[in-house]
Image: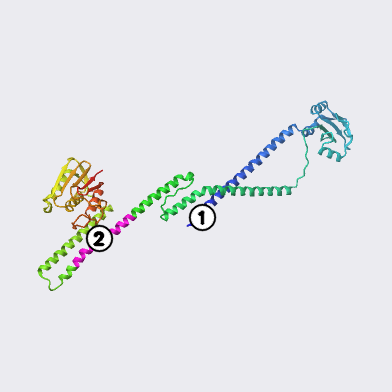
């Protein structure tokens, strides 16, 4: 089980980590694209603005201020004003680099420039912090010098292969670093988030293995309700298992008791059957033996019937034949029937009715049997002269006697095959009280028994 839990934990961690890596890569790509777009856009805007106000643009368009007069170049008045406004000076060169005209040029300016001089001037400022810009007009060239210009020129060389290699290495380094960071963060977060999930899986495995001990989890966070429900499930399963053990115990006791009760009458039947086969048995003895066999057979039949009845009642497999019944006359007639039996014609049984109009949906046959079992129990298991009183109200039926009471085993009185320690009557199957209680519960009623030694016993049957 531990190996399975470990695999599950790493599977969850791996899935979470992969999701984080995918998110990181998507964010990285999107951010890179946005950054490139912003840089291009900014560069385009800056170039546009710089071109509008730069000395380079001023120089490039300065040729508009030049004109030819009989082949000689002339600087217009507008050009001179433009140079003064810009703070620049001007030199015009012929094809050989000789200065043929100038305006506001400093005394230190050269009168002739070689091609190398022009390249050098264009690339660098001179010692007086003049920045040089070069233009062309017809067959002439011109230089525009700007002292202390805000424009700066930087010269660098670019190798495309080197740039591509550098960018590849930089991109790979960024990916590796971001991957390492993502893995570290992913492991931390996945460990924190998957730990409760692992605990949930482990808890479910414990429940599967019938470990119903309550578990208390530290900092369950968003999984608090899940852990709480798992504990509730654990309690429910624990109760069900306890009930199952109880039912199993009752079943085993049931089988044991039935087997024990059947052995005695079967042994008698077998023994007397053997005696009947003898040749020296008189007619009178045969009749006595036959009566014993008949009586024991009747007891077995009654035991089996009671056994089937209580089993069907307990498993709720016996449909009730419900009928609208007035409870007071029903119970009164039942008491009269008992008094009319020869064995109980001298019994002291009184009846009180307090709900003449009360009606309920009951199975008359089963309810009568249950109430008779309670009455017979009060009459049989007490000495002669015991008084039994039956009361019917709108909510309960009350049966009480003034007999000897039950000695110390009230909580077991409804157990199957149980007989009180103070009874000398061994007739019956021992299922009477259990059957009576099951019949009442099948009608939705509850049975409450109380007893005091020397004062008697009372049974209260309460209906909803």
Name the spot of residue 277 as percent of width and height, x first.
15, 72
Q: Give me the disc on residue 289.
A: none
Q: Is residue 188 magenta?
A: no
Give the residue number, with chain letter if any, for mark 2.
Answer: 258
- Position of the C terminus by quadrant: top left
Q: Quick check: 149 left or right of 460? A: right
Q: Is residue 269 magenta?
A: yes
Q: Which residues are magenta?
A: 245-270
Decide which of 263, 379 is in the foreground and name it.
Answer: 379
Using a 10 Å C-alpha cutoff, classify the residue at mark 1 as few (fewer than 14 neighbours), some (14 to 19) or many (20 or more).
few
Using a 10 Å C-alpha cutoff, classify the residue at mark 2 as few (fewer than 14 neighbours), some (14 to 19) or many (20 or more).
some
Decide: is 129 above or below 333.
Answer: above
CB of mark 2 within 8 Å of CB of mark 1? no
Q: Residue at x 31, y 55 (%)?
A: 247
First in residue order: circle 2 vs circle 1: 1
Q: Main secondary structure of the magenta part?
A: helix
Give the residue number, with chain letter if any, for mark 1.
Answer: 6
């Amino acid at each position: 089980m531990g190996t399975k839990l470990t695999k599950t934990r790493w599977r969850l961690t791996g899935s979470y980590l992969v999701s984080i890596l995918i998110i990181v890569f998507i964010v990285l790509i999107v951010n890179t694209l946005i950054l490139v777009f912003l840089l291009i856009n900014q560069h385009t805007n800056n170039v546009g603005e710089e071109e509008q106000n730069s000395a380079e643009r001023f120089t490039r368009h300065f040729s508009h201020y030049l004109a030819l007069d009989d082949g000689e170049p002339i600087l217009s008045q507008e050009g001179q004003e433009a140079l003064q406004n810009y703070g620049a000076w001007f030199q015009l060169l012929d094809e050989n680099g000789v200065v043929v005209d100038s305006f506001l040029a400093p005394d230190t300016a050269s009168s002739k420039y070689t091609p190398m001089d022009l390249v050098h001037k264009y690339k660098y400022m001179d010692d007086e912090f003049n920045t040089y810009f070069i233009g062309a007009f017809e067959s002439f060239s011109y230089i525009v010098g700007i002292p202390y210009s805000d424009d700066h020129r930087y010269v660098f060389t670019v190798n495309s292969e080197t740039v591509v290699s550098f960018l590849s290495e930089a991109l790979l380094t960024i990916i590796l670093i971001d991957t390492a960071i993502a893995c570290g963060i992913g492991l931390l977060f996945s460990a924190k988030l998957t730990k409760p999930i692992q605990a949930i899986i482990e808890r479910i495995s414990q429940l599967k293995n019938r470990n119903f001990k309550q578990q208390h989890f530290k900092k369950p966070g968003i999984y608090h309700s899940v852990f709480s429900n798992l504990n509730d499930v654990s309690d429910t399963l624990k109760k069900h298992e306890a009930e199952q053990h109880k039912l199993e115990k009752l079943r085993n006791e049931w089988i044991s008791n039935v087997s024990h009760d059947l052995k005695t009458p079967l042994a008698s039947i077998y023994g007397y059957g053997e005696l009947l086969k003898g040749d020296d048995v008189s007619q009178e003895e045969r009749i006595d033996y036959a009566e014993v066999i008949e009586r024991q057979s009747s007891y077995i039949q009654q035991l089996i019937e009671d056994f089937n009845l209580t089993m069907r009642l307990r498993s709720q497999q016996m449909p009730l034949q419900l009928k609208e019944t007035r409870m007071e006359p029903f119970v009164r007639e039942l008491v009269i029937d008992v008094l009319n039996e020869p064995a109980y014609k001298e019994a002291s049984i009184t009846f009180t009715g307090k709900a003449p109009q009360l009606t309920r949906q009951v199975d008359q046959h089963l309810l009568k049997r249950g109430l008779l079992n309670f009455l017979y129990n009060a009459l049989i298991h007490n000495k002669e002269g015991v008084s039994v009183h039956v009361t019917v109200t709108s909510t309960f039926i009350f049966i009480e006697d003034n007999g000897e009471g039950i000695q110390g085993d009230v909580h077991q009185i409804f157990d199957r095959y149980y007989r009180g320690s103070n009874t000398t009557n061994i007739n019956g199957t021992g299922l009477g009280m259990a059957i009576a209680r099951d019949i009442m519960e099948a009608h939705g009623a509850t049975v409450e028994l109380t007893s005091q030694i020397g004062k008697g016993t009372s049974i209260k049957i309460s209906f909803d």
